[in-house]
Amino acid sequence: MIVFDLSCEAGHAFEGWFRSSEDFASQKERGLLCCPQCGTAEVIKAPMAPAVPRKGSQQRVDESEPLPAQSGAGEGQAVSNAPMPPEVQQALEKLAEAQARALKKSKWVGDKFAEDARAMHYGEREAEAIHGETSVEEAERLLEEGIEVAPLPFPISRPDELN
């Protein structure tokens, strides 16, 4: 998964999680993206800085000092490299904990997710909580069939990739 910083024509900034740049472009082209604050579909990728960790030998910058304004940001594009507010950090931590608890009660089915979800929906298999992988297009088809599915808020590693 790729996390893009997005912004709308009104300057609202937010994140979007996509499988690839092509997935972002496809969703934008089909009108599936909208600003969570104002609802506009005029959404663009905001400029992003790579997350480069500080070397252990470098001195820590005093985070209470105001950061210099960044130049080069386009008009109407809010950009910030300020620390995340504590309330947001706490909310994300609680969401991650909730996902972890839910996954403990769920069975990994890998790339058979869509097949297993359909089998349970149509009564061909006993219903249980599952998680796995499927394409965006296949997830949309499941939803069109009335099968409830949702993406996980945080990416996970496949069980066979864990140490």
Image (cartoon, rainbow, N blue to C red):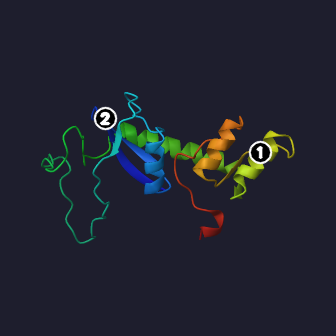
Which residue sits at x=66%, y=43%? 141
Residue 128 visible in the shown view: no
Which residue sits at x=40%, y=29%? 39
Count of numbered circles on the image:
2
Ranked by sequence position, the earlier of labels 1 and 2 is 2
Residue 64 % position (x, y): 18, 46
Mark 1: few/some/many CA within 10 Å (<14, 14-19, 20+): some
Q: Residue furthest right?
A: 124
Label 2 near label 1: C-beta < 8 Å? no
To which quarter of the image does residue 53 belong?
bottom left
The vertical placement of 6 against 56, above or below, is above
Q: Secondary structure at mark 1?
A: helix
Residue 70 % position (x, y): 15, 49
Q: Front-most of 64 and 53?
A: 53
Residue 67 % position (x, y): 15, 48
Badge 1 amino acid: Arg
Query: Quadrant location of the C terminus?
Result: bottom right
Residue 22 % position (x, y): 46, 55
Q: Front-most of 16 and 27?
A: 27
Residue annotated with mark 2: 12
Residue annotated with mark 1: 118
Numbered mark located on residue 107 in the image: none
Q: Secondary structure at mark 2?
A: loop
To which quarter of the image does residue 133 belong?
bottom right
Marks 1 and 2 sit apart, C-alpha to C-alpha, by: 38 Å
Q: Residue furthest top?
A: 38
Mark 2: few/some/many CA within 10 Å (<14, 14-19, 20+): some
Residue 137 lies left or right of residue 14; in this view the side is right
Residue 131 lies left or right of residue 13; in this view the side is right
Badge 2 amino acid: His
Which residue sits at x=81%, y=46%? 119
